[in-house]
Image (spheres, helix red, strand yellow):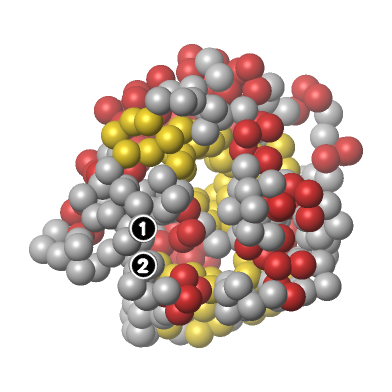
């Protein structure tokens, strides 16, 4: 079984936080044990040697920091609301509808959706549009592997994701702070990039509710609002979809959301960031530090206009 309830997981199966905090142990335990030697090499190749080395030198944030300081407006607008208000959110049974321009549209049960794939552990920088950041050890499945299974048609240029609509369990959805349900989108080449991850876990454990259980997206070179949570629908479309924050404030939030220190948010600077757990601000890296891997996808684009 790939998916287990927290109570079913033996302590020996969980990578301890102290092991994630040691880069050598993380490479050995997560990279080799989870992926195998060949898989580890592929992962490091996808990340790029310099970026991978830099990331392993960065200390991941703690479990408590990652699970108690969250943006998840479905459970409230304060950073501690998601951990307080998501305890009764039900993630089983769970289905994901795949539709649009694909050869294999279907309603997939969560277990059937993830079972064919080997989950991978990856340490990624996470950068929020409010100028704070974390380093997070996610567990998940490359989105490209899932997409290949659905066999999108050549006319599919974008992938649109939709969050569950469950106002009885998500108190934030009973407000009009945003238009519900939450929607996001990626260009097809972004969705197929080896860094893009469909997340199922955190620190070797099942993904907590407040972090987007049971299935969320991580696109590490983009701002955090692209990382849609509690996904129940994946649609393949020809035209660029609007995302929720574009609908709410198109002058502040665009479709691409690439981390760009040279383009400030209208109400604050993006040139520096505060790593949660640290006091000193640090310089924001272009594409969140993944420029060597992703910049080619935006060659010739005006990244101020396409923000």
Q: As drawn, which residue projects farthest toward the right?
A: 7
Mark 1 Cα-neighbour bin, 10 Å: few <14, some 14–19, many ≥20 = few
- In the image, 220 versus 97, the foreground residue is 220
| Quadrant that contains the C terminus | bottom left
- In the image, 39 versus 306, the foreground residue is 306
Does residue 160 appear in the picture of this structure? no
Residue name at image x 40 percent, y 25 percent: 280
Q: As drawn, which residue projects farthest toward the left?
A: 300
Residue name at image x 20 percent, y 63 percent: 304
In the image, residue 112 above or below residue 63: below
In the picture, measured across the screen, residue 281 lies left or right of residue 150, that is left
Query: Do the residues bearing badges 1 and 2 touch, measured as CB atoms within 8 Å?
Result: yes
Label number found at residue 166: none
In the picture, measured across the screen, residue 83 lies left or right of residue 178, that is right
Q: CA distance from mark 1 to mark 2?
A: 9 Å
Residue identifier under label 1: 267
Residue identifier under label 2: 252
- In the image, 74 versus 136, the foreground residue is 74
Tell me the element at label 2. Answer: loop
On the image, which quarter does residue 64 sit in? top right
In the image, residue 201 above or below residue 13: below
Tell me the element at label 1. Answer: loop
């Amino acid at each position: 079984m790939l998916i287990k309830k927290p109570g079913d997981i033996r302590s020996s199966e969980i990578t301890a936080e102290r092991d994630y905090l040691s880069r050598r142990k993380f490479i050995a335990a997560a990279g080799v044990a989870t992926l195998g030697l060949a898989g580890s090499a592929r992962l490091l190749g996808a990340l790029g040697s310099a970026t991978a080395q830099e990331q392993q030198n960065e200390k991941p944030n703690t479990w408590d920091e990652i699970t108690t300081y969250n943006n998840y407006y479905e459970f409230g607008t304060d950073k501690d609301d998601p951990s307080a208000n998501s305890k009764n959110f039900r993630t089983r049974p769970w289905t994901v509808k795949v539709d649009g321009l694909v050869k294999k549209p279907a309603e997939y049960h969560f277990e059937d959706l993830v079972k064919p794939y080997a989950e991978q552990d990856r340490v990624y920088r996470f950068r929020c549009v409010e100028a704070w950041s974390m380093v997070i050890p996610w567990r998940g499945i490359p989105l490209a592997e899932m997409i290949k299974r659905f066999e999108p048609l050549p006319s599919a240029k974008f992938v649109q994701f939709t969050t569950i609509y469950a106002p009885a369990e998500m108190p934030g959805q009973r407000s009009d702070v945003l238009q519900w349900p939450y929607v996001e989108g990626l260009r097809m080449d972004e969705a197929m990039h080896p860094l893009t991850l469909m997340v199922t876990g955190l620190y070797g454990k099942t993904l907590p509710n407040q972090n987007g259980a049971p299935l969320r997206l991580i696109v590490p070179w983009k701002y955090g609002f692209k990382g849609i949570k509690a996904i129940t629908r994946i649609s393949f479309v020809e035209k660029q979809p609007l995302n929720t924050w574009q609908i709410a404030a198109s002058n502040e939030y665009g479709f691409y959301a690439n981390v760009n220190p040279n383009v400030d948010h209208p109400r604050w600077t993006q040139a520096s960031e505060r790593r949660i757990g640290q006091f000193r601000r640090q310089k924001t890296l272009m594409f969140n530090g993944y420029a060597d891997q992703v910049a080619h996808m935006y060659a010739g684009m005006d990244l101020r206009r396409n923000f």
